[in-house]
């Protein structure tokens, strides 16, 4: 599709514990239109817990290759500027500086490692400024990553965050810690659920969390894949944007995933095969988050932190 004459292309890169994602958006004239979007599951945080919080060489190389590819794509599109941020894996890595140096030398991209508070703010902004939810008075955003899960509540009709809850479990971390058999044993499932439940139970409920005006929105690959499994169809990720996933349906999907091997999960319609090993961990976290919030539904956003980055760095503070 031809770009408008006033097109202004910018790129945002999110270097996560599990996935590297990039979006190129046309922000000309106050727009926020997707021009290009892709992700690579490089598993940067893979095996960190067993390596004294050091990034391992193979995941580093996978991630650098993904960044190299994305920077090249951005140049092909002629973006005016590209910005990149790193989250949980890089925050916790003892060899963070080595990775950042190698990324800069190889790709020219200066990755900024952001604190959890900033990650939460950008994830919330990605939902608050989205046309799907920008007119909803109260939003509660659940962001399930590879290494952590965030629950973020914003002030009514505002970009401002009033509370941010961080749970130190993500889809990769929960899987590596508890779900070690294939399929997982009953005691492993119980331990994973207990760990997630305990983590959420230890944090206070957000103010107005049960307000009738509050909508719960989930971001991240876990959400879009679980919704696609529930629908039973393989589809473009963007087509899942705004889909409403019911807690009862989530429990059915969770039970089905728990009884399947990773190889069997890879054949499920709707599931990205690259997520087959960690999708159960993500489903457990989402289930426990909804139970803690006493929410029967969660709406799916396929536009996460990288979109918040574009909104924050390249658009005016006024909602586009």
Image: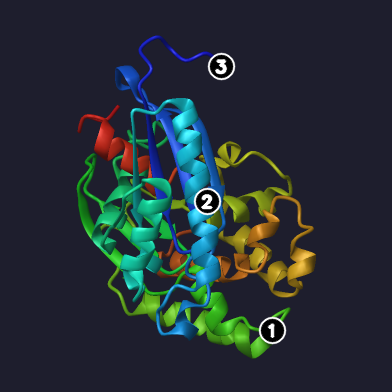
Q: Where is residue 81 in the image (x, y as percent from the top left)?
A: 33, 33
Q: What element carries label 1?
A: loop
**Picture quarter with the N terminus:** top right
Label disc, if present, on residue 66 of the rendered structure:
2
Whole-percent x and y of residue 35? 49, 27
Q: Which mark is residue 1?
A: 3
Residue 139 visible:
no
Q: Which mark is residue 181?
A: 1
Task: Residue 194: give its label.
Answer: none
Would you call the spot at circle 2 few (<14 residues within 10 Å), some (14-19), or many (20 or more)?
Answer: many
Q: How far apart are marks 2 and 3 (CA)?
A: 26 Å
Name the side, left or right, on which 216 lies relative to 173.
Answer: left
Q: Which residue is drawn at 65% across and 49% down?
A: 228
Q: Which of 245 and 65 is in front in this view?
A: 65
- Specify the quadrant of the image occupied by residue 191: bottom right
Crowding around mark 1 (Cα neighbors within 10 Å: few <14, some 14 to 19, many 20+) is: few
Q: In which quarter of the image is the C terminus?
A: top left
Task: Calculate the distance from the C-alpha at mark 3 to the C-alpha at mark 1.
Answer: 47 Å
Residue mark closest to the camera, 2 vs 3: 2
Q: Which percent across, then down, holds residue 101? A: 34, 59
Q: Do the residues labelled 1 and 2 touch (CB within 8 Å)?
A: no
């Amino acid at each position: 599709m031809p770009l408008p004459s006033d097109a202004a292309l910018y790129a945002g890169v999110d270097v996560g514990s599990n996935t590297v994602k990039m979006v190129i958006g046309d922000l000309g004239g106050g727009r926020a239109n997707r021009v290009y979007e892709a992700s690579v599951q490089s598993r940067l945080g893979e095996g960190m817990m067993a390596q004294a919080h050091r990034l391992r060489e193979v995941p580093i190389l996978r991630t650098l290759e993904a960044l190299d590819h994305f920077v090249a794509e951005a140049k092909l599109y002629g973006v005016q500027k590209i910005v990149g941020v790193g989250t949980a894996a890089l925050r916790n890595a003892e060899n963070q500086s080595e990775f950042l140096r190698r990324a800069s030398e190889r790709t020219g991209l200066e990755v900024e490692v952001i604190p959890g508070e900033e990650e939460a703010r950008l994830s919330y902004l990605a939902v608050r400024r989205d046309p799907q939810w920008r007119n909803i008075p109260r939003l509660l955003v659940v962001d399930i990553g590879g290494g952590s899960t965030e629950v973020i509540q914003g002030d009514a009709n505002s970009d401002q965050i009033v509370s941010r809850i961080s749970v130190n479990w993500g889809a990769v971390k929960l899987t590596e810690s508890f779900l070690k058999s294939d399929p997982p044993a009953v005691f492993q499932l119980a331990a994973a659920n207990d760990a997630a439940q305990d983590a959420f139970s230890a944090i206070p409920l957000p103010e107005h969390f049960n307000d009738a005006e509050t909508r719960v929105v989930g971001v991240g690959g876990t959400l879009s894949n679980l919704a696609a499994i529930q629908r039973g169809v393989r589809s473009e990720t963007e087509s899942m944007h705004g889909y409403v996933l019911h807690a009862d349906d989530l429990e059915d999907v969770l039970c089905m995933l728990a009884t399947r091997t990773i190889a069997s999960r890879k054949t499920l319609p709707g599931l990205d095969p690259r997520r087959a090993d960690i999708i159960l961990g993500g489903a457990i976290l989402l289930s426990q988050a909804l139970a803690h919030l006493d929410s029967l539904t969660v709406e799916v956003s396929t536009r996460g932190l990288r979109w918040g980055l574009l909104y924050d760095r390249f658009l005016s503070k006024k909602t586009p």
